[in-house]
Image: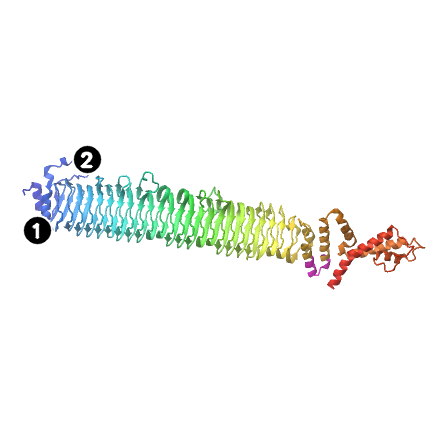
C-alpha cells in the first residue's frame, strides 16, 4: 500500500505517539464544506486501521498510538471485532464514512471535535476511556458497550436520522462516570438498563424529538453515585422508570415540554416511577408541560421541587402515590393540575411554602392516607381546588397559614387562599391523625373544611376566614378528638361551625369573630373550660355538653336566635354575662355549680329541670321572661329578689318553682318567707284563671292570704266581732249578750246556740258575719293544719 506524504508522517509518528497536526480549523460548524480541505489533509481509514492492528512496530520505552488532528479521514474505518493494544486519539477531524468499532476491545478511544455520519460501537470493551467529546454525528450506537473508566461525550451533537435513536447506549456499562453535558440531540437518547459508576452527567442537554417519541429513555438505569440531569431541555418524555441512583439525582432547572397527544388529557413529561434514590432528588426550578410521575418512588433524602412549575391542566400534574421520601419540599411550586400524594410516606416533613395550585375540577392536592413523621406545612398557599389529607397521619404539626401581621396589625386580607368548587371540601381532614397541633392562621378558605372523626393534639385558628359556599356546615369538627385545646380566635365563618360529638381534652375557646349560621357543640365532652367570648353568631347550641372544667362561659357575645344549653352537665360556673340573645336561652336539664344569666334576652330563659348548686336572684341579671319548672338549687344569693324573678315566669302556671323556693326558705329557718312565696304562688295561679273564678280567691286572699297570713285572719276576726258587737247592742230587748251573739254568728259551728234561737235578729250584718266566719274557717284551717303538721 503506497502512502501519501501525510500518511507517511502519521506512520512515522505512530511509533512514539506524537501528534500529527494537519490543520487548525474544526469541522463542526453548520457551514462546513469538506471540499475546502485539500488532499494534504486526507488520511485513508485503512491506514489508520493498519496501524491500530499492529502493522507498525513501536519504539522501546515509547507509547505507540495514533494521534491525529485536523484530518479528513477517507473511507470506512472498520475495526469490527478487533483487539487494539494501542490508543486512538483523533481531534478536529472529519470522517466521510461512519467508523465501525463494533465488538472492539481497546485500551482507549478518544475522538474530540470530530464530524462523522455516525459511530458504530456496539458491544465494545474499552479498558480505560471512551471519548466522543464535542463530536457531531447523525447517530451513535454504543449498545452493550463496556467502559473500564469513563465515557466522555460532553458537547456531543448527534441526530438527524429520525428512524434511529440519535444516541443508543442501552445496556451500557461504565465503571467510571458518563459525561454527556451540553449534548444536543435531534432524536431520542436511549440509556435503557445502563449501569454507570460514580456519576452520570447530562447537564444542559438538549433533546428534540418528533411528536409522541421519548426524548430520554433511561428505564432501569443504575448509577453507583450521582446522576445529574440539570438544565436539560426536551420536547419529549424523559423516562427514568425504575432508575437506581445510590447518590443524588439532580434535575435542577430541567425543562421538559411534551405536547399532549391529540384527544388525550393525560401525558407524562418526566417519569421516575419506582425509582430508587439513595440520597436526594433535587429538582428546583423544574419546568414540566406534562405529568411528573413519582409513583412508588423512594428517595432516602430530600425530594426538592422548590420553584418547580408543573403544567398539566385538567389532569394529574404530579402523580406521587406511594412515594417514600425523607423530606418533601414543594416551596414556591406552581402547579396547573392535581398533585397526588396518596399513601405517600415522608420521613420528616412536607412543606408547600407560597405554593400555587390550580385544579378547579376537584382536589388540587390529594394527600389521602399520607404519613408524615414531622410537620405538614401549607404556608401562604394559593389553591384553586380542594386539599385532602383524608385518613392521613402527621407526627408533628399540620400548618395552614398565611403571613402573620407584624405587631398584630390589621392587614387587607389573608395571604393564603384555598378555594374549592362543589362538591369538594376545601380542606378534607376526615379521620386525620395529627400528633401535635393543627395551626390555621391568616388564611381564607372558600369551601368546607372538615375534620370529622379526626384525632388531633390541639387546634389553633387565628384570623381565618371560612366561607362554606355550597356547604351549610363550613367548619366540621364532628366526632373529632382533640387531646388538648381548641382555640379559635377572630375567625369569620360564613356557614355553620359543627362540632357534634367533639371530644376535647382541655379547653374549648372561641374568641372574637363571627359565625353567620351558628355553632353546634352538642353531644360533646370538654374536659377543661368552654369559653365563647366576643362572638357574633346566628345561634349557639351546646346541648348535651359534658363540661368538666371550671366554667362554661358565653361572654359579651351576640346571638341572633337561640342560645341552647340544654342538658349541659358537670359544669362549674355557667356565665352569660354581657351576651345579647335575640331568641331564647334554653338551659333545660343543665347541671352546674353556679349560674350567671344575662338580662339581654328577647325571648325567654328556660331553666326547666336544671340543677344549680348556687344561683343568684339579682333581678338585674335576669331577663323578663322565665321558665323555671323543675329548677333545683342548693344555695341562693340575693334572696330578696325572688318575687321579681318568679313573677317573670311565662307560659302555663307551674307550682314547682314556688314550692321548691318555699321549701328552701323553710330549710334555712325562714318560715315567714316561705309563706310569702306560697302566697305569691296562689296569686300567680289566680291570675291565670277566668275573672269569675278569681272572685273567691280574691276574698280568701283579702281575708287570710290563702291561709298563709293568719295574723290578717285574726285581725279580720276581731274586726268582724267588734262590728257585730257594736251593731247588736242596739237590739236591747232581742239580744241579751251582743258579744256572744256576734261570736256565735262568726263561728261556723255556732257553739252558743244563739244563732238558731227565735227572736234573734238576722239582718244583713248577721248574714255578713256568717259569711265572714265561713270564709275565715276555709282560709285559716289549711294554715293551722300545716302548722300542726310541722309541730
Q: Give the left or right position of residue 510, taking residue 772 as reference.
A: left
Residue 510 image offset from top left, x and y in percent: 53, 50
Mark 2 neighbour density, 10 Å: few (under 14) some (14–19) many (20 or more): few
Residue 429 image offset from top left, x and y in percent: 44, 50
Q: Is residue 601 visible?
A: yes
**Vertical order, 311 against 735 (above or below):** above
For numbered disc 1, what is the local secondary structure? loop
Magenta-colored stretch includes residue 663: yes
Residue 409 image offset from top left, x and y in percent: 48, 45
Q: Residue 419 — which label?
A: none
Residue carrying label 2: 31
Q: Quadrant of the C terminus?
A: bottom right
Of the residues under marks 1 and 2, which one precedes in the sequence?
Answer: 2
Residue carrying label 1: 59
Mark 1 neighbour density, 10 Å: few (under 14) some (14–19) many (20 or more): few
Question: What span is colored magenta in the figure?
Answer: 662-673
Residue 167 image offset from top left, x and y in percent: 22, 44
Amino acid at each position: 500500500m503506497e502512502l501519501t506524504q501525510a500518511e507517511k508522517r502519521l506512520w512515522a509518528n505512530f511509533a512514539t505517539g506524537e501528534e500529527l497536526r494537519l490543520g487548525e480549523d474544526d469541522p463542526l460548524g453548520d457551514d462546513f464544506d469538506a471540499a475546502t480541505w485539500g488532499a494534504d489533509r486526507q488520511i485513508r481509514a485503512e491506514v489508520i486501521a493498519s496501524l491500530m492492528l499492529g502493522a507498525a512496530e513501536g519504539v522501546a520505552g515509547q507509547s505507540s498510538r495514533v494521534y491525529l488532528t485536523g484530518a479528513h479521514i477517507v473511507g470506512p474505518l472498520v475495526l469490527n471485532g478487533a483487539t487494539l493494544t494501542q490508543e486512538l486519539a483523533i481531534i478536529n477531524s472529519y470522517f466521510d464514512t461512519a467508523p465501525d468499532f463494533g465488538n472492539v476491545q481497546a485500551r482507549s478511544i478518544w475522538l474530540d471535535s470530530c464530524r462523522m455520519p455516525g459511530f458504530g460501537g456496539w458491544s465494545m470493551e474499552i479498558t480505560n476511556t471512551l471519548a466522543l467529546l464535542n463530536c457531531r454525528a447523525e447517530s451513535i450506537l454504543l449498545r452493550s458497550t463496556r467502559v473500564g473508566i469513563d465515557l466522555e461525550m460532553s458537547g456531543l451533537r448527534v441526530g438527524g436520522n429520525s428512524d434511529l435513536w440519535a444516541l443508543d447506549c442501552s445496556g451500557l456499562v461504565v465503571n467510571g462516570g458518563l459525561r454527556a453535558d451540553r449534548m444536543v440531540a435531534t432524536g431520542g437518547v436511549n440509556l435503557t438498563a445502563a449501569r454507570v459508576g460514580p456519576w452520570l452527567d447530562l447537564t444542559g442537554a438538549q433533546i428534540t424529538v418528533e411528536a409522541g417519541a421519548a426524548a430520554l429513555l433511561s428505564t432501569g438505569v443504575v448509577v453507583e453515585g450521582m446522576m445529574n440531569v440539570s438544565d436539560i431541555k426536551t420536547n419529549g418524555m424523559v423516562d427514568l422508570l425504575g432508575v437506581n441512583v445510590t447518590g443524588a439525582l439532580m434535575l435542577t432547572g430541567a425543562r421538559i415540554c411534551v405536547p399532549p397527544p391529540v384527544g388525550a388529557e393525560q401525558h407524562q413529561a418526566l417519569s421516575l416511577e419506582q425509582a430508587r434514590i439513595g440520597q436526594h432528588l433535587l429538582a428546583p426550578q423544574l419546568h414540566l408541560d406534562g405529568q411528573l410521575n413519582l409513583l412508588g418512588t423512594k428517595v432516602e433524602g430530600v425530594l426538592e421541587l422548590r420553584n418547580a412549575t408543573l403544567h398539566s391542566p385538567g389532569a394529574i400534574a404530579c402523580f406521587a402515590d406511594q412515594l417514600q421520601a425523607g423530606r418533601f419540599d414543594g416551596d414556591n411550586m406552581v402547579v396547573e393540575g392535581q398533585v397526588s400524594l396518596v399513601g405517600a410516606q415522608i420521613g420528616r416533613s412536607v412543606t408547600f411554602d407560597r405554593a400555587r395550585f390550580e385544579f378547579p375540577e376537584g382536589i388540587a392536592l390529594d394527600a389521602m392516607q399520607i404519613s408524615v413523621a414531622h410537620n405538614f406545612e401549607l404556608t401562604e398557599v394559593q389553591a384553586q381546588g380542594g386539599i385532602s389529607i383524608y385518613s392521613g397521619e402527621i407526627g408533628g404539626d399540620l400548618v395552614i397559614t398565611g403571613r402573620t401581621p407584624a405587631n398584630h396589625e390589621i392587614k387587607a386580607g389573608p395571604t393564603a387562599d384555598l378555594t374549592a368548587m362543589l362538591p369538594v371540601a376545601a380542606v378534607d381532614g376526615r379521620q386525620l391523625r395529627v400528633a401535635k397541633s393543627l395551626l390555621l392562621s391568616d388564611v381564607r378558605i372558600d369551601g368546607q373544611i372538615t375534620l370529622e372523626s379526626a384525632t388531633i393534639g390541639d387546634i389553633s385558628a387565628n384570623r381565618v376566614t371560612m366561607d362554606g359556599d355550597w356547604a351549610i356546615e363550613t367548619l366540621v369538627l364532628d366526632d373529632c378528638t382533640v387531646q388538648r385545646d381548641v382555640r379559635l380566635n377572630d375567625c369569620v365563618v360564613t356557614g355553620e361551625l359543627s362540632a357534634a360529638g367533639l371530644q376535647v381534652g382541655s379547653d374549648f375557646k372561641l374568641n372574637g369573630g363571627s359565625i353567620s349560621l351558628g355553632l353546634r357543640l352538642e353531644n360533646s365532652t370538654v374536659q377543661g373550660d368552654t369559653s365563647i367570648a366576643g362572638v357574633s353568631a346566628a345561634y349557639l347550641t351546646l346541648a348535651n355538653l359534658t363540661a368538666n372544667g371550671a366554667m362554661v362561659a358565653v361572654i359579651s357575645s351576640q346571638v341572633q336566635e337561640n342560645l341552647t344549653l340544654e342538658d349541659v352537665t358537670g359544669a362549674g360556673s355557667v356565665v352569660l354575662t354581657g351576651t345579647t340573645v335575640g331568641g331564647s336561652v334554653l338551659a333545660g336539664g343543665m347541671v352546674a355549680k353556679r349560674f350567671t344569666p344575662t338580662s339581654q334576652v328577647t325571648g325567654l330563659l328556660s331553666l326547666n329541670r336544671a340543677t344549680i348548686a348556687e344561683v343568684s336572684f339579682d333581678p338585674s341579671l335576669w331577663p323578663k321572661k322565665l321558665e323555671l319548672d323543675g329548677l333545683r338549687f342548693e344555695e341562693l344569693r340575693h334572696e330578696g329578689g325572688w318575687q321579681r324573678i318568679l313573677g317573670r315566669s311565662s307560659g302555663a302556671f307551674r307550682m314547682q318553682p314556688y314550692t321548691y323556693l318555699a321549701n328552701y326558705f323553710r330549710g334555712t329557718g325562714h318560715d315567714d318567707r316561705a309563706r310569702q312565696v306560697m302566697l305569691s304562688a296562689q296569686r300567680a295561679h289566680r291570675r291565670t284563671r277566668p275573672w269569675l273564678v278569681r272572685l273567691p280567691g280574691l276574698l280568701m286572699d283579702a281575708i287570710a292570704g290563702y291561709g298563709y297570713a293568719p295574723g290578717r285572719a285574726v285581725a279580720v276576726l276581731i274586726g268582724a266581732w267588734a262590728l257585730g258587737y257594736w251593731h247588736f247592742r242596739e237590739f236591747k230587748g232581742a239580744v241579751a249578750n251582743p258579744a256572744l251573739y256576734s261570736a256565735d254568728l262568726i263561728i261556723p259551728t255556732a257553739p252558743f246556740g244563739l244563732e238558731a234561737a227565735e227572736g234573734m235578729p238576722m239582718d244583713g250584718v248577721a248574714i255578713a258575719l256568717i259569711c265572714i266566719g265561713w270564709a275565715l274557717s276555709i282560709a285559716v284551717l289549711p294554715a293551722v293544719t300545716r302548722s300542726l303538721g310541722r309541730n
